[in-house]
């Protein structure tokens, strides 16, 4: 009985630590459009950057200009949107969808 309690306690602690660890990441979704024409942009680079401007991860927009990126929810993290012929845009990471128009 004592061994069963110990194993149950260890299993519960591992489960709680896994749930807490999983909360460090959030899913960011949005759409990228041209600022003047309002057309969606295909293949825009969407990059997660840390506070020291190091690349953490990234993706590209799809045929409809949509993207989704799982990012670390930490202070100083940003998302950079870059596309050939357009000015790059940097947006702080938040918990809601980011719809951006670049020029």
Image: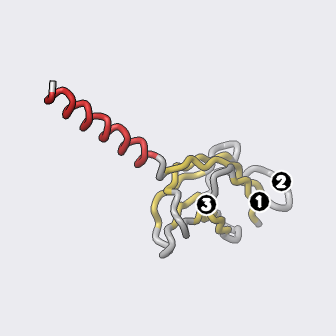
The residue furthest right is 36
Say which of marks 2 and 1 sits in front: 1
The residue furthest front is 2
Instruction: Report how far apart the C-alphas of labels 2 and 1 lie in the structure.
Output: 8 Å
Q: Nearer the viewer, residue 87 or 53?
A: 53
Q: Are marks 1 and 3 in contact (CB under 8 Å)?
A: no
Q: Which residue is mark 1?
A: 101
Say which of marks 3 and 2 sits in front: 3
Q: Which mark is residue 38?
A: 2
Element under disc 1: strand
Query: Considering only order in the chain, which callout, 2 or 3, is on the residue closer to the N terminus?
Result: 2
Query: Considering only order in the chain, which callout, 1 or 2, is on the residue closer to the N terminus?
Result: 2
Q: At 58% from the left edge and 58% from the top edge, which residue is drawn? A: 45
| Residue 15 point in image, percent of width and height | 34, 37
Mark 2 Cα shell of 10 Å, populated few (<14), some (14-19), many (≥20): few
Q: At 60% from the left edge and 49% from the top edge, which residue is drawn? A: 28
Query: Considering only order in the chain, which callout, 3 or 1, is on the residue closer to the N terminus?
Result: 3
Instruction: Report how far apart the C-alphas of labels 1 and 3 lie in the structure.
Output: 16 Å
Element under disc 2: loop
Q: To which quarter of the image does residue 84 belong?
A: bottom right
The residue furthest top is 1
Q: At 62% from the left edge and 53% from the top edge, which residue is drawn? A: 43
Q: Nearer the viewer, residue 2 or 89?
A: 2
| Residue 87 point in image, percent of width and height | 70, 71
Say which of marks 1 and 3 sits in front: 3
Q: Which mark is residue 93?
A: 3
| Residue 6 point in image, percent of width and height | 19, 34
Instruction: Report how far apart the C-alphas of labels 3 and 2 lie in the structure.
Output: 23 Å
């Amino acid at each position: 009985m004592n061994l069963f309690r110990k194993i149950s306690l260890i299993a519960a602690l591992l489960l709680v630590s896994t749930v807490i660890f999983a909360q460090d990441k959030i899913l960011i979704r949005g759409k990228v459009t041209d600022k003047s024409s309002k057309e969606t942009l295909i293949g825009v680079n969407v990059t997660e950057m840390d506070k020291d401007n190091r690349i953490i991860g990234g993706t590209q927009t799809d045929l409809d200009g949509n993207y989704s990126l799982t990012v670390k929810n930490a202070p100083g993290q940003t998302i950079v949107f870059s596309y050939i012929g357009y000015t790059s845009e940097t947006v702080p990471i938040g918990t809601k969808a980011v719809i951006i128009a670049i020029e």
